[in-house]
Amino acid sequence: MIISFISNMNLPDNLLAPPPLKGWKMESDTPSLSEVHRTVDIPKSAKFWQKMLAFAGPGYLVAVGYMDPGNWATDLAGGSQFGYTLLSVILISNLMAILLQSLAAKLGIVTGRDLAQACRDHYSKSVAFCLWILCEIAIVACDLAEVIGSAIALNLLFGIPLVWGVCITAFDVLLILFLQNKGFRYVEALVIALIVTIAAAFGAEIIFSHPRAVAVMSGFIPHLEIVKNKEMLFIAIGILGATVMPHNLYLHSSIVQTRKYDTDAEGKREAIKFATIDSTVALTFALFVNAAILIVSAAAFFTSGQHGVAEIGEAYRLLSPTLGVGIASVLFAVALLASGLNSTFTGTLAGQIVMEGFLKIRLKPWLRRLITRLMAIVPAVIVVVLYGASGTTKLLILSQVVLSLQLSFAVVPLILFTSDRKKMGEFANSLWIKILAWTVGVIIMSLNIKLLFDFFGITNFFIGLFN
């Protein structure tokens, strides 16, 4: 009642704000993504659904990282080799992602810092610099997957050579800047439109492939066989490693701050609630897309005895003949192109966030995003020229290994910060959230470490990668 009475007095925001949190070394100075910080108004007297729509958007930018081209190869391989069995791994991975993204959103809303700024404040300069280097490598690796995915899609749809397709992807940076200058909601609208395109394409693919409903439902139940079968476990770990993206944690903690929510305790509590709803709904779309890729692969290839389909180009060529539907392959490539374009938006945004957050270096947005894109395009062009389409597939796999290596360095600080009452005040993680978060963190770290060791152990993987 007291808070409500004070709010009705229309006092300035700074008088309503709670005392600053004491667990930080310095005040939060430059806002994260300052050009769009708190630019989206939240109607204070609106109904639940209106507020939910106002907060909706950041979760969908995050979700595109969970359905990017890096996931396609593992989902295709899992479906063609083992049918619907690994659907449970996709479900578990998605639940882990929902928890971690909710923590990232809470960190940004409560502290006014993104994860990169929080790391810079908490750790020494040398540690923060190392974390920045690791994060930049992960962003380039992720962007590399999107560049390759987009180039493959352009090649499949229009016959554009892979080299030119890779170069064309540089121009989507201009599209991002154009939309962001018009308002951040335009960026979100385009991303949501592309997600709907991907979901619609795979919805049609599921109809064409006629999967068995009972087998699909059974696949969402974890099977002990996944652990016993080494080949199945290897792909399962690959699915997990390709699902939870480290750069998304930095990204989400920043873009939730584009909303102009009240900065008092009640306002932050409301913002956390709606941001969590937003990301959960958006990641449910990602779950549908990843599950749909595996379901279509299982229904089309596993049931017809084609158990070796793992490459995107091979799946494109075989899909229409196998299903007997001419448009099936075209829809597959359209969804791939939408996925690649979508994910490039978030990768370049994340690059700007981590450079500003870790180093306090502000470049012009177009320059920062062009740098990120060029660092992905150059190795992609070299590999395409030297090794062709087979090289791009191996480079796609390598990018997922690099992401796995970096993931722990984002997850551990996130859990530490959001569990610290000095840093988060009353919004610190409760005991059961701490237990759940650390369990998820340990599982992710253990499985990704195993994935890396497996890759290192496969006939000198890195040395003979392109032989």
Image (cartoon, rainbow, N blue to C red):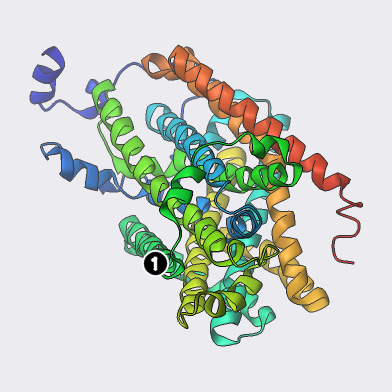
Q: Secondary structure at mark 1?
A: helix
Residues packed near mark 1 inside 10 Å, few (<14), some (14 to 19) or many (20 plus): few
Q: Is residue 117 visible?
A: yes
| Picture residue at 60% right of the left edge, 28% below the top | 441
Please name whichever residue, 152 or 43, is drawn nearer the observer in this view of the structure.
152
Please name whichever residue, 239 or 57, is drawn nearer the observer in this view of the structure.
239
Residue 294, image x, y percentages = 54, 56
Residue at far bottom of view: 159
Residue 155, image x, y percentages = 61, 81
Q: Is residue 319 above or below residue 343?
A: below
Position of 1 with respect to 187 (left or right) is: left
Q: Is residue 382 above or below residue 15?
A: below
- In the picture, the quarter occupied by the N terminus is top left
Q: Is residue 176 above or below residue 405?
A: below
Residue 354, image x, y percentages = 58, 44
Residue 227, image x, y percentages = 68, 35
Q: Is residue 22 visible?
A: no
**Residue carrying label 1:** 207
Please name whichever residue, 366 or 306, is drawn nearer the observer in this view of the structure.
306
Q: Is residue 282 above or below residue 408?
A: below
Q: Amino acid at mark 1?
A: Ile
